[in-house]
Every structure is written in structure tokens, then in C-alpha cells.
Image (cartoon, grey):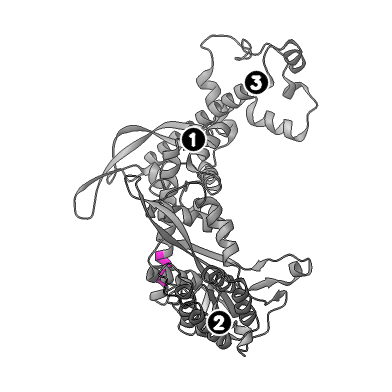
Amino acid sequence: MMKSIVEEKLVSFKALEQKIFSYVCELGREITTIMLEAYDKELADGRDKKNYRDKGIRTTTIKTVYGEVTYGRRVYQTKLEDGKKAYLYLLDEAMHMDKIGLISTNLAEKLAMTVTESPYRVTAQIINSTCGQSISAGGVWNVIQRLGERISEEEEHAVKQMNAGQAEGKKEISVLFEEMDGVWLNMQDGHHKKMKKQEMKVFTMYEGWDAEREKQNRSALVEKTMLAGMEKSREFHEKREGYTRKKYDADGIGQRILNGDGGVWINEPYDPDVIFQLDRYHVCQEILRKISDRKAQKEIRELFDAGKPEEMLEYIQVYAASVESPDEKDRKSQKAQKLYKYLNNNREGLLPYDKRGIQIAEPPEGIIYKGMGVQESQNCTVITLRMKNRRMRWSVKGANNLSKALYRKENRELTETIDRYTDGIVFTMQMQEIVETLSAAKAPKKDGKGNSYVDVVSAHMPILEAMQTASRKAFKKAFCC
């Protein structure tokens, strides 16, 4: 059959594939409708009829990877504790549809995974072309907003647990490395009008570097965990600490070393005993930005690399005085003074922890310690590539919610998170029962024996007539009588 189709050019394989895909999606939707309505009936039969009065069937639609499934489910009238009437759907409660809406776990995972790589409009196009589902860019946006809100609620719950002394973290560790930085995003208001840039806060913690990977000249962080968001500094630090204590026992962390760019919000650590050091990349960046003279740049960099912060600061002061000019347009001295102020305000962190005589515990087996400064790379791969340099503008809410999906994906927690906020029921109905139900519903209304699909089947059936492999037997058992 396939040979004749190709040779006679009756239909292209692309068209054939599309037709088969469409039919299978249609079959999947019908199967799902049967299962949902059967489960709704089961809930109706087993309910407390005194407390839940059946008020009829209402139809709704759930989005799946094979299209929108329309089904009917019963609405019930009940009374709240205060005596007021309320209406609810037992099926929706069983499926946990109050979480991120009428959307299947599989589709939610595909949406979230795709949107972390591509814009909302592109994500909608990909889903529409690869699934039986039709969804708009706005529909994708709505799902991600709801998911981001749920993740934010989890972060807030972790903070409440921490403040109540009920943090989940049990792991003890000698040294915990922490890094923080910001990513500046183009913003817009509710009317899509351009606003001033705002900084997204990004945090990374890890236990060290993988010793085996280092032998292969590859760098990999051990137990890396990230957090990102648009919160105010105090709220972000609370969430950061709550997230840390969800994994580690706070009293069991020997030393905490924080690497940052010296920003005001970064210098407000939740733990006052944290060892702070100024990020080397940002120091070098500021030297290049504030000092235009190449020779002076080199001198300052050499003093910094040699671990001579006092001499470096003195050199900058001398340089600022030497280039002072009455010309208001000449800002060399002013820029040099700004560099001095920036470095002087972070004087204690100019030397890395290992050059200050600070003793830390030996690394555990399989882990090594080395110079910090991984946050810029993490910002790029997790946030920047998705949210910057594409002429994009964000609302605070939109940026915050997408950042939650991005960092959860990097932590390899996104799929697990989605599972918690989508369908909550497990079906045990056998596929054969569903197929029989479908067959009965579609059976032609005529007497006599024989195959009900004899008028449809007019060619050889490769699956049935070919050599019976294990997969073909499974197909026959599931779908053929």
C-alpha cells in the first residue's frame, strides 16, 4: 500500500503523516472524554448525597498535547461552614484544577520547557505545529504567569517555615559558596510603554567544583542551586535564605562565602557572619570603564592581581589628582574618583578569602575549591540569553514569573514543580475497556455479524499482517479486537 501511494503520487508522505496524526489526536481526545466522564460518574455515585446536591452537568474543556478535550462534569450545591451556599465540581477538585487551570501535565511541561528557550509567540507556533493543540501566545503567557505565581508561593512558604523554625533542610556542610548579581532588563508598563530599566536579582549557591571534571579540563559546580526574581532586596534575601534552609541545616553550615559586585542590595546578607569578597570580573570591568589611559589601567590591574589593595587605592587617588582639569567636559578625574569610591566602599572584600589568611575546612572527597566568580556565566545561560538582546520589554510581573520557570529549569526542578500543579488523579481504567466503549459508540446500526469497519478497511493492514514483534502484539492487544 505504501509503495503504491509513493509511486502513484496519490498523496505525499507529509500529508499522510498529518492525516494519521490528526486521527490519532482525535482518538486521544475521545478516549480522554470517556475517562473523565466515567470518573465524574464514579465520584457522583460515591459522594455524600446529603451534602452535595447534583445540579446538573456542565461542559468544559481541558487543553492537552493532542488538542482540546470537551467533556461534561456535574456541578454540586453544598453549604459552607457559615451556612452560605456554594457550588463546586468534584471532578475539578480531584484533578486539582484550581492550581494552574484546565491544562494537562504533559502540555504544561512542553509549554514551560519551550518558553524557557523561545518567546511566547514562537512557543505557541511550536506547540501548534507539533501537538494537536491550538494555543495563542497569550494562552502560553497565562500558563507561565500562573506557574510563576505558584512558585513564588512556594518561596514564601519556605520563608514562613524558616521564620517559624521549621525549615526542612537537614544537610550539614563545612563550606557553602554563594554568589549574587543582577541582570538589567528593559521594562514596560501595563500599556506597553517603555519604562526605566530594572534589575533582576540572581543568586547561585554551590558546594565547590567537581574534581573529576577538573581533571578533564571541564568545570562543573557541585550541588548548584539558583534563585531569581524581581523582588525588593529584603524580600529577595528572605527568599534566598529560606531556599538555602530548605536544603541545608543553617546551624550545620560551617562557613559561608559570598561573592558579589558590591551592589547595595548584595551587601545586605541575611547572615551577618558571611565572608564577603568583591567579584573580580566587576572590579576589572569598572577599571576599564572609569580609566581611559591604558598605562594607568595596566598599573591598577597589576596591583589588584598582586593582592595590594592599599597601593591600588593610593595609585587611583594620585592618578585622579594628576588628570584633574578645569575643563568641565574632561571627566577623567571624576571617573577615577568614582572608581576609588567604589573600591574603597568594598575595601574589606578586595582580597579574596584565600588571600586574607582565612582558614576554611578541607573540601570533601570528590570536590575541590578554587577562585569564585561564576555568577556572570550563570546569568548569561539562565537569564540573559532568554530575556535580553531581543528587543524585548517586560512588566515586573511578567519578568518575575518567567524567571521562576527559568531558575527551576536550571535546578532540574521544573518538571517536578509542574507535576505538583497539574492533574492530580491517576486512572486505572484498562485501554481495552476504552476501545470497546469507542467501538460501541461508533458501531454501524445494522444487524448481522462481521467486522464493523469492513467498509472502511479496503487495503492490507501492515500492523496485523506483518511479522508479530513484541511492539505490534502490544498494539493489537490495546487497539484491536
**Label 3, on which residue?**
16
Task: Tell me the distance, in whole angstroms, between the alpha carbons under discs 3 and 1.
Answer: 29 Å
Tell me the SS state at disc 1.
helix
Give the percent coordinates (x, y) of residue 60.
38, 34
Q: Say which of marks 2 and 3 sits in front.
A: 2
- What secondary structure is marked by label 2? loop
- Residue 39, quarter of the rendered image: top left
Q: Nearest the camera: 204 or 392?
A: 392
Image quarter (top left, top right, bottom left or bottom right) of the N terminus: top right
Q: CA distance from mark 2 to mark 1?
A: 64 Å
Magenta highlight: main SS: helix
Quadrant position of residue 6: top right
Viewer-proximal residue among 286 and 199? 286
Q: What residue is shown with label 1?
A: 35
Against 332, residue 46 (above or below) is above
Task: Give percent across and percent down for residue 197.
Answer: 41, 57
Q: Which residues are magenta?
A: 156-161
The percent coordinates of residue 186 (x first, y second) are: 43, 53
Q: Quadrant where the C terminus lies?
A: top right
Disc 2 residue crowd, few under 14, some 14–19, many 20+, Cα 10 Å: many
**Magenta segment includes 159:** yes
Residues tagged 3 and 1 counted as in contact (Cβ below 8 A): no
Between tags 3 and 1, which lies in front? 3
Q: Which residue is mark 2?
A: 350
> At label 3, which amino acid type do we have?
Leu
Q: Looking at this rendering, what residue extends furthest in the right direction?
A: 467
First in sequence: mark 3 or mark 1?
A: 3
Report the Cα–Cα distance between label 2 and label 3.
66 Å
